[in-house]
Amino acid sequence: MTVACPQCQKSVEWTSENPYRPFCSKRCKLLDLGAWADGSHRIAGEPHMDETELDELIDRLERGQE
Ligand SMILES: [Zn+2]
Protein backbone atom coordinates (compact mmCIF):
# COMPACT_ATOMS: atom_id res chain seq x y z
CA MET A 1 0.00 0.00 0.00
CA THR A 2 1.24 3.46 -0.83
CA VAL A 3 0.05 6.90 0.13
CA ALA A 4 0.93 10.34 -1.23
CA CYS A 5 3.24 12.35 0.99
CA PRO A 6 1.17 15.31 2.24
CA GLN A 7 4.12 17.61 1.63
CA CYS A 8 5.59 16.67 -1.72
CA GLN A 9 2.95 14.26 -3.07
CA LYS A 10 5.56 11.60 -3.63
CA SER A 11 4.36 8.01 -3.33
CA VAL A 12 5.29 6.62 0.05
CA GLU A 13 5.11 3.00 1.05
CA TRP A 14 3.02 2.69 4.20
CA THR A 15 5.11 0.34 6.29
CA SER A 16 6.23 0.20 9.88
CA GLU A 17 9.73 0.68 8.51
CA ASN A 18 8.86 4.25 7.68
CA PRO A 19 8.64 6.12 10.98
CA TYR A 20 7.69 9.30 9.14
CA ARG A 21 4.61 7.98 7.40
CA PRO A 22 2.48 9.32 5.88
CA PHE A 23 5.40 11.55 4.97
CA CYS A 24 8.17 10.30 2.70
CA SER A 25 10.93 11.58 4.96
CA LYS A 26 11.80 13.37 8.16
CA ARG A 27 12.32 16.49 6.08
CA CYS A 28 8.73 16.48 4.86
CA LYS A 29 7.36 15.68 8.30
CA LEU A 30 9.25 18.58 9.85
CA LEU A 31 8.32 20.86 7.00
CA ASP A 32 4.67 20.08 7.61
CA LEU A 33 5.13 20.73 11.31
CA GLY A 34 6.94 23.95 10.56
CA ALA A 35 4.17 25.11 8.27
CA TRP A 36 1.94 25.71 11.26
CA ALA A 37 4.55 26.10 13.98
CA ASP A 38 6.25 28.95 12.23
CA GLY A 39 3.63 30.71 10.16
CA SER A 40 5.82 33.79 9.89
CA HIS A 41 7.92 31.99 7.31
CA ARG A 42 4.98 31.72 4.98
CA ILE A 43 4.31 34.42 2.47
CA ALA A 44 0.85 34.59 0.94
CA GLY A 45 0.87 33.09 -2.51
CA GLU A 46 4.29 31.57 -1.92
CA PRO A 47 3.80 28.46 0.21
CA HIS A 48 7.15 26.86 -0.50
CA MET A 49 10.21 27.73 1.53
CA ASP A 50 13.50 27.68 -0.23
CA GLU A 51 16.11 25.10 0.62
CA THR A 52 18.08 27.34 2.96
CA GLU A 53 15.06 28.29 5.00
CA LEU A 54 14.00 24.68 5.18
CA ASP A 55 17.38 23.56 6.42
CA GLU A 56 17.38 26.28 9.03
CA LEU A 57 13.91 25.32 10.15
CA ILE A 58 14.83 21.66 10.46
CA ASP A 59 17.93 22.66 12.39
CA ARG A 60 15.86 24.68 14.82
CA LEU A 61 13.27 21.97 15.27
CA GLU A 62 15.93 19.35 15.88
CA ARG A 63 17.50 21.52 18.56
CA GLY A 64 14.09 22.07 20.13
CA GLN A 65 14.20 25.82 19.73
CA GLU A 66 10.73 26.47 18.50
ZN1 LIG B 1 7.62 14.12 0.95
Image: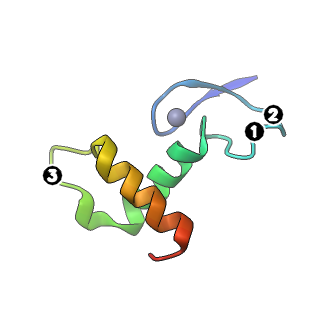
Q: Is there CB contact under 8 Å for labels 2 and 3?
A: no
Residue 35 in the figure: left or right of residue 24:
left
Secondary structure, mark 3, is: loop
For the point 41% across and 68% down, the residue is: 37
Instruction: Give the residue number, with chain letter if any, for mark 3.
Output: 44
Badge 1 or badge 3: first in the primary sequence: 1
Residue 1: image x %, image y %? 76, 22
Badge 2 or badge 3: first in the primary sequence: 2
Residue farthest bottom in this picture: 65
Secondary structure, mark 2, is: loop
Residue 40: image x %, image y %? 24, 66
Q: Any mark on residue 15, and which?
A: 2
Q: Amino acid at mark 3?
A: Ala
Q: Amino acid at mark 1?
A: Asn
Mark pair 1, 3: CA separation: 32 Å
Residue 40 in the figure: left or right of residue 57:
left
Residue 33: image x %, image y %? 48, 59
Position above or below: 10 against 35: above
Residue farthest right in this picture: 16
Dot 2 beta carbon under 8 Å from ligand 1: no
Instruction: Give the residue number, with chain letter if any, for mark 1.
Output: 18
Mark pair 1, 2: CA separation: 6 Å
Who is closer to the viewer here, 11 or 30?
30
Who is closer to the viewer here, 62 or 20?
62
For the point 34% across and 67% down, the residue is: 38
Mark pair 2, 3: CA separation: 35 Å
Query: In the picture, residue 18 is in which quadrant?
Result: top right
